[in-house]
Image (spheres, grey):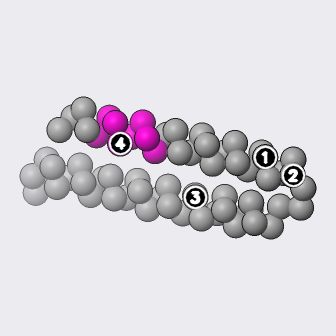
C-alpha cells in the first residue's frame, strides 16, 4: 500500500467519524426545545466544521 493510499484510508475513517458526529448533532438540533439549546448545538456544529476544514487544509499541505 502506498503512502497516499494509507493517508486516504485514514482520511476516510476520520470522515466517517465526523459524519456520524454531524448526524448526531443534527438530530439533537432538530429535537431541541428552545432557541438557546439550538444555539449551543449550532456552536458545536461550527467547531466541528472548523476542525474538518483544518484537517482538509493539513492534508492538502502534505500532498
Question: Magenta residues?
Answer: 52-59
Check the image and report above or below for 5 versus 44. below
Q: Pointers 4 and 3 in contact (CB under 8 A)?
A: no
Q: Which mark is residue 56?
A: 4
* Residue nearest the observer in this picture, 3 or 27: 27
Mark 4–mark 3 distance (CA, rounded to whole Å): 16 Å
**Residue at 10% in and 57% down:** 1
* Residue nearest the observer in this picture, 9 or 40: 40
Give left or right: position of 46 versus 34.
left
**Residue at 70% in and 67% down:** 27
Q: Pointers 2 and 3 in contact (CB under 8 A)?
A: no
Give left or right: position of 10 versus 41.
left
- Dot 4 or dot 1: first in sequence order is 1
Label 2 neighbourhood size at 10 Å, few (<14), some (14-19), many (20+)? Answer: few
Label 1 neighbourhood size at 10 Å, few (<14), some (14-19), many (20+)? Answer: few
At mark 2, the secondary structure is: helix
Mark 3–mark 1 distance (CA, rounded to whole Å): 15 Å
Mark 4–mark 2 distance (CA, rounded to whole Å): 31 Å
At mark 1, the secondary structure is: helix
Residue receiving disc 2: 35
**Residue at 21% in and 34% down:** 62
Q: Which mark is residue 39?
A: 1
Residue receiving disc 3: 22
Amino acid at each position: 500500500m502506498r503512502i497516499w493510499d494509507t493517508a486516504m484510508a485514514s482520511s476516510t475513517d476520520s470522515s466517517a467519524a465526523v459524519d456520524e458526529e454531524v448526524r448526531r448533532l443534527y438530530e439533537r438540533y432538530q429535537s431541541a426545545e428552545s432557541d438557546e439549546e439550538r444555539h449551543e448545538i449550532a456552536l458545536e456544529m461550527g467547531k466541528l466544521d472548523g476542525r474538518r476544514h483544518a484537517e482538509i487544509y493539513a492534508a492538502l499541505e502534505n500532498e
